[in-house]
Image (tube, rainbow, N blue to C red):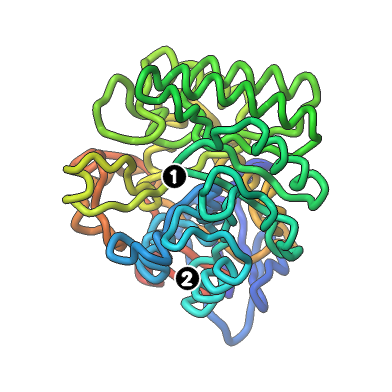
Amino acid sequence: MLICNAVLTDADGARPGDVRIENGVITAVGEGLSIGGDTVLDAGGRTLLPAFIDLHCHFRTPGFEYKEDIDSGSRAAARGGYTFVNCMANTRPVCSSAAIAQSIMDDARRIGLCDVNQCVSITKDFDGKTTGHLRALPRNIRFISEDGKGVRESRVMYEAMRIAAEKGLTVMSHAEDMDLSALDYRLAENLETARNLYLAQSTGARLHMCHVSTKEALADILAAKARGVRVTCEVTPHHIWFWDSDFRVNPPIRAKEDVEALIAAMLRGEVEAIATDHAPHTEEDKRGGAPGMVGLETAFSVCYTKLCREYGMPLADLSRLMSRGPAEILGLNKGLIAEGYDGDVVLVELGEPYTVRREDFAGKSKNTPYDGLSLYGRVACTVKAGRVTYGTMEAIG
């Protein structure tokens, strides 16, 4: 595949040029490239970015396929410009073994639209106590998470982090003190954030803080980085778009001062990644109070509109947050438009707004608060390993 006449933009900056992809890998980047006998896509001067990578996603398989499955989730990802997602373990049964994780990753590979890394639970079957299963994990399992809840007992989290440090696992933390959630959700996030940072410092474990939402939690994370803790963090699109909203997510939408603190840190380059926390639910589930929203199909547009158009963030910095930063955390050969990197790219239309319509979503669930909103940054075409997974040649010709 040759993609020509594009504005190539990644974490290293922007430049006009062409991209040649062979056998799934970028083999040449420059101007005036040629190729014989294969697909040529004319970008028409539009912007070509590295495809997006989601550190934090729920595809609901196994057990909740009526909300989302690997096929529908992969199509939603492709429509949003994603070619790789990292799925959480709160499935039924809970993903507490390498066998379950591998079956999910194999399914995604067969579908071929979006690669999946599957996390394993920190405690076996989310029992809050058992960590011995972590010692049996093979080398290809590298991330553990109890997402949807925090690990209640400090001793158990300490044991998990000690094993993680020994085996090279990354602990993904849903920071929520479950004993305080019903009383004060801000305090619940802040206390568990501080606890996990000190446990990571003590054990030497690699820690990733999910969906950071309060200014206090963020400040503690930045302070921990300064003292050498091996910690990275993510922010979701909805936690920078909304404030004082009653749309139910976990952690909840915070105050305007929290949003401003998160955005300021992102502008300063102190946040490693934007992650969607894509959480599909049925309308009945949402009416019953289920927390979460779908996010894969709107993430880039929400972030481009908010961060780049409103706050002046360079597009290269947004690319770092949505592609290169997550790739580095996951250990992927992705996230840059450069020779030798995977041929995963996304073409975006930046100049004209479009209207979000939930009925157009490729995923099964439509639980979005963005329906009817006018946003910039429409995804026109997604390419994975040199193959179009969303959009058509006509869409970009």
* Amino acid type indicated by mark 1: Asp
| Residue 322 position within the rendered picture, expressed as x and y whole percent measured from the top left | 55, 44
**Residue 257: percent from left, percent from top:** 42, 12
The quadrant of the image that shows the C terminus is: bottom left
Q: Residue at x 44, y 44 (%)?
A: 276
Is 365 left, or right, of 113 in this rendering? left
First in sequence, mark 2 or 1: give its number: 2
78 is higher (above) or lower (below) than 38? above
The answer to whether residue 100 of the structure is visible from this angle is yes
Q: Which mark is residue 44?
A: none
Q: Is residue 200 left or right of residue 117?
A: right
Mark 2 Cα within 10 Å, few/some/many (few <14, many 20+)? many
Q: As rendered, which of 44 and 322 lies closer to the eye?
A: 322
Q: Secondary structure at mark 2?
A: loop
Which residue is located at x 76 percent, y 19 percent? 226
Q: In the shown orientation, is residue 342 left or right of residue 296?
A: right
Toward the bottom, the furthest residue is: 37
Q: Position of residue 216 (x, y in %)?
A: 54, 15
**Which residue bears the numbered disc 1?**
277
The amino acid pointed to by label 2 is: Leu
In this view, the residue in front, 72 or 154, is 154
**Circle 1: element type:** loop
Q: Quadrant of the N terminus?
A: bottom right
Q: Residue at x 17, y 43 (%)?
A: 287
User: Relative to 284, is 223 above or below?
Assistant: above
- Give whichever of 164, 216 is nearer the camera: 164
Q: Residues within 10 Å of mark 1 (few under 14, many from 20)?
A: many
Across and down, in percent, residue 364 comes to 27, 62
Residue at which label 2 appears: 113
Residue beneath the point at 60% across and 34% down? 233
